[in-house]
Image: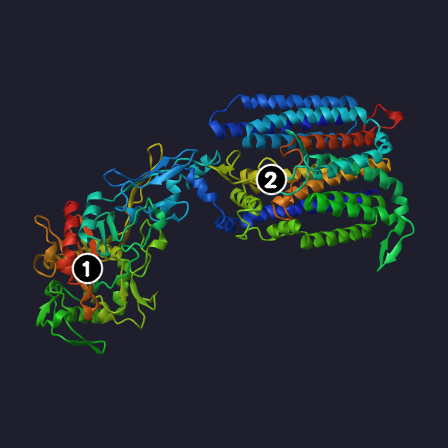
Amino acid sequence: MTARNRELVALVPATLLLIAGFTAIFIQESNVVSNVSLTYGAAFLGLCLVTHLVIRFTLPYADPYLFPLVAVLACFGLVIIYRINDTLARQQAGWFVVGLILFTVTILFVRDLRVLERYRYTIALVGLVLLFLPRLPIIGDPVNGAYLGIKIGPIAFQSAEFGKLAIMIFLASYLRDTRQLLVQGQTKILGFALPPLRTLGPLLFVWGAAMLMLIFIRDLGSSLMYFGGFLALLYVATNRPSFVLFGLILFGLGAWFMATHVPHVQDRVDVWLNPFNPRWVEGSGYQIAQSMFAQADGGLFGTGFGASLLTVGHTTLIPAPQTDLIYAVIVNELGLVGACGLILVYLLFAERGFKTAMVASDSFSKLLAVGLSSVFALQVFVIVGGVTRVIPLTGVTLPFVSYGGSSIMANFILLALLLIVSDKARRPAAGNVGRRRR
Amino acid sequence: MNKPVGRLFVLVVVLFAVLVGFTSRWTVFDAQALRENPANHRILLQEERIKRGVIRAADGSALAVSRPIGQGRYARRYPTSDLFAHPVGFFSIDRGRVGLEDSYNDALSGRETTAIGAISRLLGPQDEGDDLKTTLSPAGQKAAYAGLNGRAGAVVALDVHSGAVRVMAATPSFDPNDPKNASTFNRATQGRYPPGSTFKTVTAAAALDSGRYTPNSTLDGHSPQTISGAPLSNFGGEQFGQVDLTTALTNSINTVWAQVGVHVGKATMADYMRKFGFYADPPMDYPGRQMLPSGEYRNGRLLPPTSQFIDVGRMAIGQDKLLVTPLQMATVAQTIGNGGVRMEPRIVERVIDPDGRTVAHPLGKVATRVMSSKAAGELTQMMYRVVNEGTGTAAALSGVKVAGKTGTAEVDPAAGINDLWFIGFTPKDAVAVVIERAHGTGGPVAGPVAKQVLQALGG
């Protein structure tokens, strides 16, 4: 079977999941199996088929599992959001259409990845602007004290979602050029191999940027995500674990300093360590406390699709259920079993992403795939880890599942870039076009 | 460059495993603690969205109903206010649950425990609970409160044959519609009183059923006599000669029954007390934390029934360190009236699901046979004499045979303050009445209350 046919077959689980999910919710809410659920399923299946055709014609050799995995995540998210608020679900479906258009546009315009390398400084500048835009007065739109998006009139825009792509593209191309320099002529301090000072400069610069983000964006999770993505790239580019260790120590020191000296970061850490303190359990600790209560309520198998209590009267039991705390809703309704399934899908996506990096032929493609896969996996870790109290709770989205146009669009661009890398890597050599590689 | 990529993937696997680990922590390992966290209103709010079942009296009148208050929420209302507050209890977001609202919470909130119920739960939680049909009699309950007339005390009436709770009254009561200010201490099940002479029925049961005595056995009734090394007097120092046991019960002669207790012995007394239900949590369909066991207490704790600290002679006449609940003494009367078979007391007769099907029949479970029907018959005859010509004449009903025993437990002899008792039964109903810290004796004060309740229950 060719890669594309395998992709087509792999879309079946996503469609089944979608239909089953909508059916369950309709039964739950009105005790009537409505044919609307089938309409939804059919519409989404159509959308998936269109995307499949786009890939078939533009990237015939690309990895066949990346898109079906995204489809599963997207269906899952759509069902959960529909259950929270059907208006939001219709908007989310609209965002999927926009995301798929953007996906197609990206594939058509970035047929050659060298385009990205050529404009890397422009891309870096755009990335930085996107990251720091939310701190500008008037348009900046802080959510729970974190600056991750902007708002111009009625249009809200999570600029940080796109910022992560720009930063990863820049770092991949930058490290491709400098990786040789970074490995050569190292100085040893306490037995650790450190790069020479002139190449250490950029490393420290990125660290400084991450610390600035911690101060300006006020979000430990997103700065962990960006800096983690950078360290992953640095490690793959240089194969020097000591760099990563050095970077982690620097980040740890910086984070510790922020947590003990910057009041709002300090508050976040206090709430994280001790969410049930009566001083803030009804205030700043409400979100994380309710998240844990909702998960405890879900137990092993959950309360069932559509059964979760989100609000009672004027009391909100799960704040921001469609974005930050969507994972808590999922655990509440589908239990530990459902949550494990979801995490497994993310793990499979990451696996395909790293696999793509492994088969990539040139350094830039390889680094780009590593960077995108890492930042994707880290984003999952940061938001799920926040909701489950592994780390302080932050306001990033759960990729392809959370509600939000910016997140959907940015992640479809991420998918497009991964597929471009994959297609190029798996394209058979010019001599034997007839034999398609699996 | 591929080796670091592989290692990076391993790191991602580890990170995601941490996520699964923490999710399991909250959903499984720490779930119970999180559910019980005082900041967690989730469970109660969830229950507020359930239309709880109706609790009904034996005559079908509603004792607890759920009314919609908008936004899919329900409020609990108790039409009979304080009349049935103790048995029915309340369901409150702020104060939790007491009474039947707690012991039948699973049924009332539709949380099915059967296999079929579990399957239907997969389609989402039930939002309508089961109804309870109780055995409580509004007429009997009203008579009990009228008889208590505001005095601290309690009345428990049981159906002699089934063990059904017909009356459970305790003063003070409370308004379950205002749970914030309610004091839920239930003297019928949590009040512990020295039983006084009513306990002589238990001693008599042990004496007759063990075969050591018959109703005609004669003993010396002079006063005082030395029991366990200390002198013991009859009530008011009254003197009797050689009397048989029937006479000794009719006139409640302490010295005779103390001798019987000593002769029967600690082990046999302990055996019969256990069979009557002493030294164990009452097997009633009521919250365990709202019921206390009866028996000998020392420093606030239940003694082992054969403990060296027990003075069996004084225990036999309801003194020593013996503390009993009105529910326990009602059970003693029910057992004797039922030919020696103790029934488990039940407030609920049937649990009825929203479709009208009876899903549970809690009523009518035999606890144990305490004594032979012959011994029970003999004891019943002795207790008829108490009401007909002895200390309990105030409880006599015209046209219906009433068996009984009075009790006057001295609490503050100098001030003349006693806990006043009457226990007894008709062929249909058994009753126990206690009036706390009052002047007078059990027969004239508690007896009429029992009479009114038995009358209201229909003889």
Nearest the eye: B16 or B97: B97
Subunit that carries the residue with mark 2: A
State the residue position of label 1: B421
Q: Are marks 2 and 1 on the same chain?
A: no
Q: Secondary structure at mark 1?
A: strand
Q: Position of residue A255 (x, y in %)?
A: 71, 51
Q: Vertical placement of A53 versus B351: above or below?
A: above
**Residue B10 in view of the camera:** no
Nearest the eye: A437 or B418: B418
Q: Is the residue marked by circle 2 packed among few (<14), some (14-19), or many (20+) residues within 10 Å?
A: many
Residue type highlighted by circle 1: Trp
Q: Position of residue A384 (x, y in %)?
A: 64, 42
Q: CA distance from mark 2 to mark 1?
A: 62 Å
Q: Residue furthest right?
A: A185
Residue at 41% x, 33% y: name it.
B70
In this figure, which colouring scheme has been used for the structure? rainbow
Residue type highlighted by circle 2: Tyr
Question: In the shown orientation, is residue B12 left or right of residue B251?
Answer: right
Q: Secondary structure at mark 2?
A: helix
Nearest the eye: B75 or B157: B75
Residue at 53% x, 47% y: name it.
A282
Residue A327 disc label: 2
Residue at 51% x, 51% y: name it.
B33
Count of residue discs: 2
Subunit that carries the residue with mark 1: B
Q: Vertical placement of A11 versus B420: above or below?
A: above
**Residue A31 in view of the camera:** yes
Q: Vertical placement of A55 versus B444: above or below?
A: above
Question: In the shown orientation, is residue A332 left or right of residue B223?
Answer: right
Q: Residue furthest front?
A: A138
Q: Position of residue B278 (x, y in %)?
A: 29, 60
